[in-house]
Amino acid sequence: MGREKKINDVSVVIDAAMEIIEELGYKEVSTRRIASRLRISPMTLYNYYKNRDAILKGIIKKGFDELWAGLQEKIDACCSANNPLRVYLVLADHMLDFGMARPNLYRFLFTSAFSPLPLDETIADRYHGVSKALLSRISALPNRQDILNDIFMFQVLMNSLVLSVLDHKADMTADRYPSLIARAFDGLLLRDRLYLD
């Protein structure tokens, strides 16, 4: 019996799984399919990852790393301290761009049974990091919770709209997205700007 082929760089496992997600969707990710793509046995794969869930957690971490790549630069380029809520318009554009480029990965990150935020503190920190600059400005305001609720509702609407574009629901298109995001921003966050001036 020959020796099992070894993996020199375990990141290839996550890369292979992400390719499968993009091609077939996350429900099709299996250790057998990943092993086949890497031309190793499923048992060899278990030398590096305990099970499929461990691989999916790795995909979540790498997926969020890809999602956040470049976001801070976009925020720095167009958002000032005078208008911290504008960050959410930049985030909305960034999320749609990522969703259009990596639709199945976006679906996995935001709709799979794997809730990404509690899995890894760095993911949660980065996800909530968009709001950090704002939090210090609203910490003493009596309506702090109302502002946070508005931000949460905006983010839920934003993700729902991105998913609607990706899934072509309700005649939703990427062309309609900016006007609906602007409407959500005006209705939820623009009113909170009064408290930040």
Image (tube, rainbow, N blue to C red):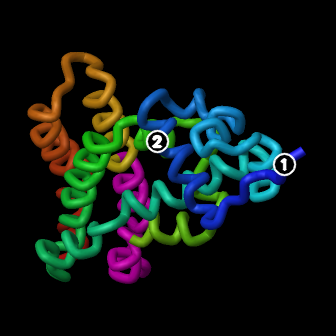
The image position of residue 148, as x and y in percent, is: 41, 60
Q: Residue at x 20, y 57 (%)?
A: 89
Name above or below for residue 177 compared with residue 194.
Answer: above
Which corner quadrant of the image does residue 90 belong to?
Answer: bottom left
- Quarter of the image containing the N terminus? top right
| Image quadrant occupied by the C terminus | bottom left
Q: Residues within 10 Å of mark 1 (few under 14, many from 20)?
A: few
Residue 107 is tagged as none
Residue 29, compared with residue 46, is above or below; it is above
Task: Give the residue displayed 26% in from the left and 21% down from the top.
Answer: 168
Spot the residue most to the front: 1
In the picture, the disc for residue 19 is 2
Left/right placement of residue 93 relative to residue 120 reads left
Which residue occupies 40% across, 58% down? 146
Residue marked by disc 1? 2
Where are the magenta residues, as a range?
130-153
Q: Secondary structure at mark 2?
A: helix
> In the image, which is nearer the foreground, mark 2 or mark 1?
1
Q: Amino acid at mark 2?
A: Glu
Direction from residue 32 to residue 89 in the image, left or right: left
Percent position of residue 11, x then y = 57, 61
Q: Are marks 2 and 1 in contact (CB under 8 Å)?
A: no
